[in-house]
């Protein structure tokens, strides 16, 4: 089974929560090992949102493997490879949840973090695109452009248990699903897509 | 115990700083989707749950927080927690 999830966080669109809420946000979202990492991180903001995006990406991937799970961020534990305390443009590791271990890759720039979490032997393809007016549509266009399949469309079907009542996106041509797993995300100015064949 | 309309008024004020689509707040109802209609992202939704905990003196479990999709869901969980 190969599945992928992705998530982008726009640093310009970070929640305006006051400091008392930000501290409790960390306690609610992060496992104890992750809180220790944040305390030691050179750029705690980048690491916090890398952790958050990693959990969101892993949740999207996990949701494709069975019933929609309860999304408690703290139960999705990020296990870094290497030293995440120092600033770096690329972070890697895994996200562990229940009995699953998703491979993780996070791109970190001055503008955003973009996390990819997946199961499968090969790394997914993925990209972040900037379009402040319609980042979600830009992500879909980018995905379809990379696929390059005439007549392909990104669709979603109704699904019980999700916040918006819809299941994960998939790609189809004339109603027939293509054998590629995809994920979409958008936040602030940025849209992002990922696919795993 | 607070009435539903009173709770909803407080919830709207809690939502206000986190909402990108302020126009949608003007016509807010129990059916308004916090993520889709108000364009609140998932990180901000965590902050909103924490603000609700502070404002109403309640503890919202992960399972309860995960079920919040609409303004009505938030109001219901507050009323349920206050009654418990």
Image (cartoon, helix red, strand yellow):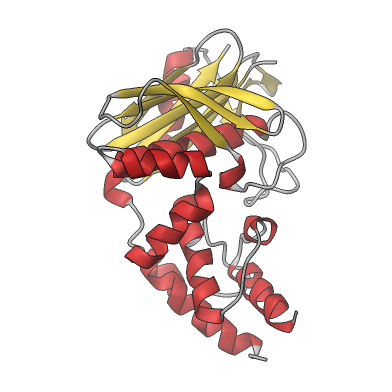
Q: Residue at x 50, y 46 (%)?
A: A30
Quarter occupied by residue B18: bottom left
Coordinates of residue A172 in the picture (x, y in percent): 63, 22
Q: What is the total number of numbered labels drawn onto the structure image?
A: 0
Quarter occupied by residue A65: top right
Q: Residue at x 33, y 52 (%)?
A: A14
Establish if B74 lies above or below A105.
below
Coordinates of residue A135 in the picture (x, y in percent): 38, 40
Image quarter of the C terminus of chain A: top right
Image quarter of the N terminus of chain A: top right
Which is more toward the observer, A157 or A34? A34
A33 with respect to A61 (left or right)? left
Q: Residue furthest top?
A: A121
Coordinates of residue A35 in the picture (x, y in percent): 44, 45
Q: In this rendering, does residue A114 appear at all?
A: yes
Q: In this rendering, does residue B19 appear at all?
A: no
Q: Residue at x 73, y 43 (%)?
A: A159
Coordinates of residue A152 in the picture (x, y in percent): 56, 20
Q: Residue at x 31, y 43 (%)?
A: A44
Which is more toward the observer, A111 or A21? A21
Establish if B67 lies above or below A168.
below
Establish if A110 lies above or below A152.
below
């Amino acid at each position: 089974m190969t599945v992928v999830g992705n998530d982008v966080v726009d640093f310009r669109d970070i929640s305006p929560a006051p400091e008392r809420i930000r501290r409790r946000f960390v306690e609610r979202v992060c496992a104890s090992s992750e809180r220790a990492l944040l305390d030691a991180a050179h750029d705690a903001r980048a690491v916090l949102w890398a952790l958050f995006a990693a959990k969101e990406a892993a949740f999207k991937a996990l949701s494709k493997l069975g019933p929609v799970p309860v999304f408690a961020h703290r139960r999705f534990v990020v296990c870094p490879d290497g030293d995440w305390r120092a600033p770096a443009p690329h972070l890697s590791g895994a996200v562990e949840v229940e009995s699953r271990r998703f491979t993780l890759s996070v791109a970190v720039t001055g503008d955003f973090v973009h996390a990819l979490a997946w199961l499968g032997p090969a790394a997914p393809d993925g990209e972040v695109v900037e379009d402040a007016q319609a980042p979600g549509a830009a992500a879909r266009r980018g995905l379809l452009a990379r696929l390059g399949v005439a007549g392909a469309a990104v669709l979603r079907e109704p699904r019980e248990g999700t916040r918006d009542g819809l299941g994960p996106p998939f790609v189809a041509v004339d109603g027939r699903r293509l054998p590629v797993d995809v994920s979409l995300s958008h936040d602030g100015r940025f849209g992002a897509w990922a696919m795993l064949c | 115990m607070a009435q539903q309309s009173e709770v909803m008024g407080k919830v709207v004020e809690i939502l206000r700083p986190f909402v990108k689509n302020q126009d949608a707040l003007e016509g807010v109802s129990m059916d308004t989707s916090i993520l889709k209609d108000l364009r609140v992202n998932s990180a901000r939704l965590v902050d909103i749950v924490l603000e609700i905990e502070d404002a109403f003196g309640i503890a919202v479990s992960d399972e309860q927080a995960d079920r919040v999709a609409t303004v009505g869901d938030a109001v219901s969980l507050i009323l349920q927690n206050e009654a418990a």
